[in-house]
Image (spheres, rainbow, N blue to C red):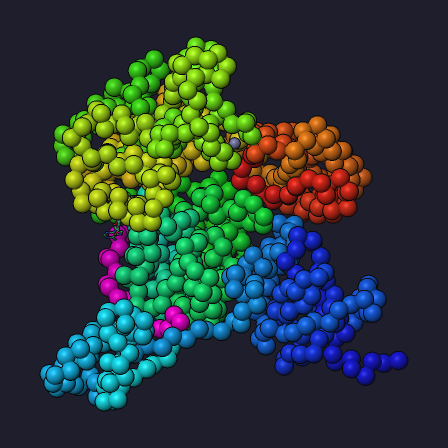
Amino acid sequence: MPDPFSAAPRIIEVAIPTPLRRCFDYLPGPDTPVQGWQPGLRVKLSFGHRDMVGIVVGTKQDSDVPTSRLKPIKALIDQTPLPADWLALCRFTARYYQHSLGDTLFQALPVLLRQGRPLEARTLDRWRLTSRGQKTSAEQLGRAHKQAELLDMLRQHRRGMPHTAITAQGFTRQQLEALAGKGLVEVHTEQAIAPPRDNHETLAEPSLTLSREQSEVLAALHAQLGRFSPSLLHGVTGSGKTEVYLQLIEAVLHRRQQALVLIPEIGLTPQTLDRFRRRFNVPIVALHSGMSDNERLDAWEAAGAGRARIIIGTRSAVFTPMAALGIIIIDEEHDDSFKQQDGLRYHARDLALVRAQSEHIPVVLGTATPSLVTLRHARDGRYHHLHLTRRAGHSRKAHIELLDIRGRPQDGGLTPPALEAIREQLALKRQVLIFINRRGYAPTLACHQCGWLAECPRCDARLTLHRHPPELICHHCDHHVALPDACPSCHSGDLRPQGSGTERTEDALATAFPDTQVLRVDRDSTRRKDALQHTLDIIHRGDPCLLVGTQMLAKGHHFPHITLVVVVNADGGLYSADYRALETSAQLLIQVAGRAGRAEHPGRVLIQTHHPDDPGLLLLAEQGYDALAERLLVERRQAGLPPYRHLMLLRGESPHQQNLLELFGRIGEALRGHVAAHDIRVDCLGPVPAPMERRQGRYHVQLMLAADGRAPLHDAGAWLVHYMEQLPEARRLRWSLDVDPVALD
Ligand code: ADP
Ligand code: ZN
Ligand code: ZN
């Protein structure tokens, strides 16, 4: 019998934030959306015994579950669905990363929308002068002095001020109302993140005159506006990439489009944001972890509605819906922080490319040290390869030297030649940066009698010695242990710190250069809000000083007075088990080196190493990153590693070592059987224990899948996830599938 209500779907498919890789069927509830049950509508429903928010992803006429057992949707949250291209990007993400669609959608939403808050612009009341108020002088208010003062203050704030800001300045509600009674002030209601009034200029300050190289690059990028076109902007540190972004965005704004800029960190590099804000007269929003939930919702809404014209954010900003997106820029594209390392393990750079393709817009990947993945695409002609080879202004490129530290005494990690080089620069009243990639006082504590080392009871790792306060801390699981008075093994009291961390280097420098200020920048020294900014302010004053820090200092900062960079130890990346270690440590060294020689003084970079003959390190020092990258690409091709092959990693963890390895052995066998039976061209390697097998008291193993093509790898991954979900033993362990892993730990 034909259904008399055939226009109305009988079943609504809903995505719910659970790890389960499936959607759920519901019956339509009491509310009917005005424009029908479109994908992207948020609804309230009960799931199990809980009330939850879900997102409609489809409709159908029949369910595998008997209708009598289906529940109705409780209520409709949205009348207008979330944007279709946002939904499409989330669907792609869930599929590509083999993740639950419900979880993906909810991770891509601001917290308040996950909780069911309506999506609408919040409004803000601001008090401002009426046109009569503008013509009234303070004197005309006679003896009402406070009112006169208030009138003058509002005259300074043409956009008006919220009530709270006015009372915070010591004025009262009565004074405001008195002025309102005289028709001099009024309340104006505007949306959060509203465009500026009275000003139609895009630029708030003139742009710089570009160098010839910059102009050529900009012209090439201009030509790509309006269509999908990826470019690698490969420019040495300080070559003026950011200036190119700014002028390109200016063109995008003139096309009445929006720009999305992804950067690795906002907290560490407030300058980047400041530069955008100084340049443009349009609403710019930043999206980062330091924002309140309300601010995030405002930013999301304003971007989606098109009022925010430039969005600058860290990796999750790639999911921000934008009404008229015209370009995506990814600064420092090589940075691993674009890859989320837990839960939904997406790579924001890769998703940005997917998004740009589906929205038909260009995407610019900027860096001084391209990732090998991006470099390969550029070399194969899939990306435009644009170069900036010279530094902007007059600054010259730093000169890199390797310093052999074998057999040399060290003080806080620094050898006599390094100390001498520092002394020279201080005598010239310059600043020096000492880079050491380890916080704390020393990487471990050792017994000088029996060789005992302080180890974490929960991890296969040494405990780091900290001085302030004195204790041993595991940097992997944050386990804290009091300092022992004597060796727990032989009871000797002769316990000594081994190696150096930032605190010890700081101490050594303070002793060697008692008249010079030593500033330390690491996660410990910058825990207090504003501590980093305070330190940066001191450095920018330009007085001679020594700056000791971790990679927090490597990103984005411009230190015009630093003329020498000392790298305490470059050996970490040389003989690591991780095939990407040399790539990432070379990128870091070049980033750090880029801090030197920004102003008129040429910079010098001293890299201390036990392996001054290492071919990779030599190539980096003598010929630079690009030469090393070429060589690494050849090696990767020969070894059958990314970017020439693709990887997936199945990770598992459990408190029981033996069962875990045995179970993963069986999973590996099943997978091999499946790919052999279906002629899927995927290799299955392992299982092997993770490089740090025990972490937080749990054992970690991994199974690697490798393939030449993405399609077979994807098929094998999908099968594996399904197999794991059915496997009863897998319920008792934690496991995850990492597509295109950036770290094999
Ligand atoms: P990058 O992003 O490549 O590190 P920036 O855009 O930050 O480089 O430029 C480095 C410095 O050079 C900045 O202080 C910037 O203001 C300056 N600069 C960039 N382009 C020009 C230019 N065309 N003329 C003068 N100074 C410039
Ligand atoms: Zn001992
Ligand atoms: Zn630990």
Residue 428 location in percent, x, y? Answer: 14, 32
Residue 276 location in percent, x, y? Answer: 32, 59
User: How many numbered circles does the render carry?
Assistant: 0
Residue 398 location in percent, x, y? Answer: 27, 35
Closer to the camera, 331 or 277? 277
Judge whether 563 appears above or below 295 on screen. Answer: above
Residue 527 location in percent, x, y? Answer: 36, 44
| Dominant secondary-structure state across the stretch colored magenta | loop
Residue at 48 percent across and 36 percent down: it is 478
Judge whether 318 appears above or below 325 on screen. Answer: above
Residue at 68 percent across and 31 percent down: it is 656
Residue at 72 percent across and 30 percent down: it is 659
- Can residue 57 be seen in this snapshot? no
Q: Quarter holding the N terminus? A: bottom right
Quarter of the figure with residue 9? bottom right
In the image, taking residue 573 as reference, residue 683 lies left or right, namely: right
- Can residue 433 be seen in this snapshot? yes
In the image, taking residue 17 as reference, residue 471 lies left or right, namely: left
Closer to the camera, 497 or 107? 497
Q: Is residue 397 magenta?
A: no
- Residue extending farthest to the right is 1
Residue at 69 percent across and 54 percent down: it is 21
Range shown magenta: 192-214
Closer to the camera, 318 or 267? 267
Closer to the camera, 358 or 149? 149
Q: Quarter holding the C terminus? A: top right
